[in-house]
Amino acid sequence: MSKIIEQKKQVVNEIAEKFQASQSTIVVDYRGLTVSEVTELRKQLREAGVDFKVYKNTLTRRATEVAGLTELDENLTGPTAIAFSNEDVIAPAKILNEFAKKNEALEIKAGVIQGNVASVEQVKELADLPNYEGLLSMLLSVLQAPVRNFAYAAKAIAEQKEEQGA
């Protein structure tokens, strides 16, 4: 009996550590998905470096107590899977939201974004943001614009002086 309890305590600690270490955590209801659909979803998440697991709700509730995320408890009903991402904040939300659009059986329940519990609406807003590379390219284009405009202005002045000198 105590061996089973020890195993459950280890699982609770594992879940709590994942909650605390992850940048972004999304809780979903996967009821109604076929095995091939779940396999495809797992593949997409794995490629993005996201850990996707199914845990018992009672063990997850105990882990939310340890991690200080008890607001999530109301969403831990029925078949629940959890996607943990330690690196990219946006990746799990984006992948799960896109998958949910194609497969209505997948339902996003809630999330934890950098230690704060997020509603379904907040998770979907996060999914609509561009990923890290997209944000970086936007930033670079914004930083590059003044330099480009200065180069155009300098070229125009040089051409104007050439015309005046000719």
Image: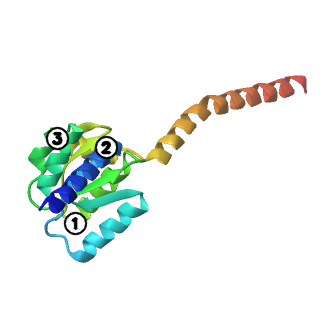
Q: Amino acid at mark 3?
A: Glu
* Mark 1 or mark 3, earlier in chain: 3
Q: Amino acid at mark 1?
A: Asn
- Say which residue appears at 75% left-offset and 27% top-offset: 154
Number of the front mark, 1 or 3? 3
Q: Residues within 10 Å of mark 1 (few under 14, many from 20)?
A: some
* Mark 3 or mark 2, earlier in chain: 3
- Say which residue appears at 12% left-offset and 51% top-offset: 76
Please say if 156 is above or below 64: above
| Structural distance between the alpha carbons of marks 3 and 2 | 25 Å
Name the residue beneath numbered marker 1: 103
Camera-nearest residue between 76 and 43: 76
Name the residue beneath numbered marker 3: 65
Disc 2, SS:
helix
Q: Residues within 10 Å of mark 3 (few under 14, many from 20)?
A: some
| Structural distance between the alpha carbons of marks 2 and 1 | 19 Å
Coloration mode? rainbow
| Structural distance between the alpha carbons of marks 1 and 3 | 32 Å
Label count reads 3
Q: Which mark is residue 126?
A: 2
The reply to whether the C-beta atoms of the residues labelled 2 and 1 are less than 8 Å apart is no
Residue 113 appears in the figure: yes
> Is 119 on the left-hand or right-hand side of 92?
left
Q: Quadrant of the C terminus?
A: top right
